Image (cartoon, grey):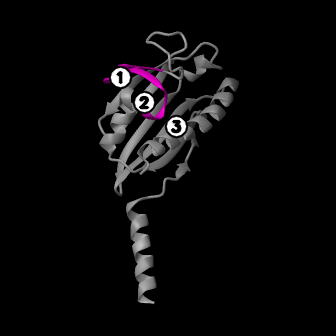
Amino acid sequence: MKSLYLAALLACSACATSPAATMSDTSFVMADGSRAIQLSGWLPASPAEVYRTITTAEGWKTWAVPVAFGGGGVGSFMETSYDPAAKPGDAGNIMQQFIALIPDRLVVFRTTKTPAGFPNADLYMKTIAIMELAPEASGTRLTFTHEGFGKEPGFDQLYGFFLEGDAQTLEALQKVFAP
């Protein structure tokens, strides 16, 4: 009986130090009626490691895209592409601008250029992405808030697309740091 109790106690302590790689959805509606996607997940890495991964071109290539250029600080741009042969300035590239950075705690960016034909690109460029990092157990809690999905009809399509896409983003980050 004591062995069973000890095994259960050890199992519970392991859970306390390594939260499951699950994701929670706390999306919400702002006072003005616009919507925000908010997803949260635990990553088995320090806030500093996660911050480097989401603010550098080398980091983006581990979880988001095969090609990335730039980054560096507030106001800087990260140019990315899903095309492994892309070069800087290619028409199909995506451009994000970092609008706020607090090392190891906060990353805020917005998309300033989408590939040609991206549905509702003009509306999408009105949204911002916020990644908050907080130490938790032996890793980092990343809360990803994507806000600014207005009430215009085109925002409905974007919201549905990014609700799924942002979940995939968080899952990709969890895989980068998976043991």
Label 2 sits on what residue type?
A: Trp
Q: Residue at x 55, y 37 (%)?
A: 166
Q: Residue at x 36, y 48 (%)?
A: 45
Total numbered labels: 3
Q: CA distance from mark 3 to mark 1?
A: 18 Å
Dot 1 alpha-carbon crowd within 10 angstroms: few under 14, some 14 to 19, many 20 or more? many
Q: Residue at x 55, y 47 (%)?
A: 26
SS at mark 1 in the image: loop
Earlier-in-chain disc, 2 versus 3: 2
Q: Which residue is mark 1?
A: 71
- Residue 46 as seen in the image, left or right of residue 22: left
Q: CA distance from mark 1 to mark 2?
A: 10 Å
SS at mark 3 in the image: helix
User: Is the N terminus in the top left, top right, bottom left or bottom right quadrant?
Assistant: bottom left
Q: Which residue is mark 2?
A: 60
Figure quadrant of residue 73: top left
Q: Is residue 2 above or below residue 18?
A: below
Q: Are marks 1 and 2 in contact (CB under 8 Å)?
A: yes
Q: Which residues are magenta?
A: 61-80
**Where residue 122 sits: x, y (%)?**
59, 16
Q: Is 62 a magenta residue?
A: yes
Q: Which residue is mark 3?
A: 169
Earlier-in-chain disc, 1 versus 2: 2
**Where residue 168 sits: x, y (%)?**
56, 39
Earlier-in-chain disc, 3 versus 1: 1
Question: Can you tell which of label 1 and label 2 is closer to the viewer?
Answer: 2
